[in-house]
């Protein structure tokens, strides 16, 4: 999904992270180490989920492929293997996810 659509989910997760830290502090008499650990884990999960929910559109990406790409022909008596001698252009298409 688009990150703009995911932003409200991130905000809810961050609010929940702070709420969890608050309740963790109330439960153990506000042990700073526990509070920091609780908040860090929750924020890391929220940010990770936000970033990995992105749909990445790479349809506009073109790549110049340098010379030297292996080329092999087969199926005939004149089958040969060699390499390209000029650069080529690779077109990319589709959507992907960040992993």
Image (cartoon, helix red, strand yellow):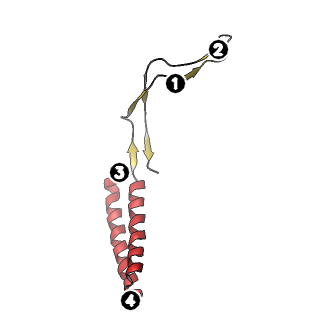
Task: State which mark lies toward you, 4 or 3.
Answer: 4
Q: Are marks 1 and 2 in contact (CB under 8 Å)?
A: no
Q: CA distance from mark 2 to mark 3?
A: 48 Å
The residue at the point 40 percent across, 48 percent down is 55
Residue 58 image offset from top left, x and y in percent: 39, 39
State the image quarter where residue 74 is shown.
top right
Name the mark on residue 69: 1
Residue at horizontal 39 percent and vertical 64 percent from the top = 46
- Mark 3 Cα within 10 Å, few/some/many (few <14, many 20+)? few
Q: Secondary structure at mark 4?
A: loop
Q: What whole-number distance in Å separates the C-alpha atoms at marks 2 and 4?
A: 78 Å
Identify the image quadrant of residue 90. top left
Q: Is residue 56 above or below residue 36?
A: above
Q: Earlier in the sequence, mark 3 or mark 1?
A: 3
Question: Sequence-wise, which precedes: disc 2 or disc 3?
Answer: 3
Q: Is residue 82 left or right of residue 6?
A: right
Q: CA distance from mark 4 to mark 3?
A: 41 Å
* Cα distance in 3D space between marks 1 and 2: 17 Å
Q: Give how far apart the Cα atoms at labels 3 and 1 are.
A: 36 Å
Q: Which mark is residue 79?
A: 2
Which residue in the rendered view is the most extreme toward the top? 78
Other-residue count near label 1 (Cα within 10 Å), few / some / many at <14 / 14–19 / ≥20: some
Eye-nearest disc, 1 or 2: 1
**C-beta proximity under 8 Å, tags 2 and 4:** no
Could you say where residue 8 lies in the image, as x and y percent from the top left?
A: 32, 62
* Residue corresponding to mark 4: 29
From the image, tell me which residue sits under label 3: 2
CB contact under 8 Å: marks 4 and 3? no
Crowd class of label 2 (few under 14; some 14 to 19; many from 20; radius 10 Å): few
Q: Earlier in the sequence, mark 1 or mark 2?
A: 1
Label 2, secondary structure: give it. Answer: loop
């Amino acid at each position: 999904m688009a990150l703009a659509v995911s932003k409200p989910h991130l905000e809810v997760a961050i609010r929940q992270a702070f709420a969890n830290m608050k309740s963790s502090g109330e439960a153990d008499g506000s042990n700073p180490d526990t509070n920091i650990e609780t908040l860090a884990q929750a924020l890391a999960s929220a940010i990770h989920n936000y970033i990995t929910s992105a749909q990445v559109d790479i349809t506009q990406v073109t790549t110049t492929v340098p010379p030297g790409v292996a080329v092999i022909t087969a199926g005939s008596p004149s089958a040969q293997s060699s390499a390209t001698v000029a650069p080529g252009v690779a077109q990319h298409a589709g959507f992907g996810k960040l992993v």
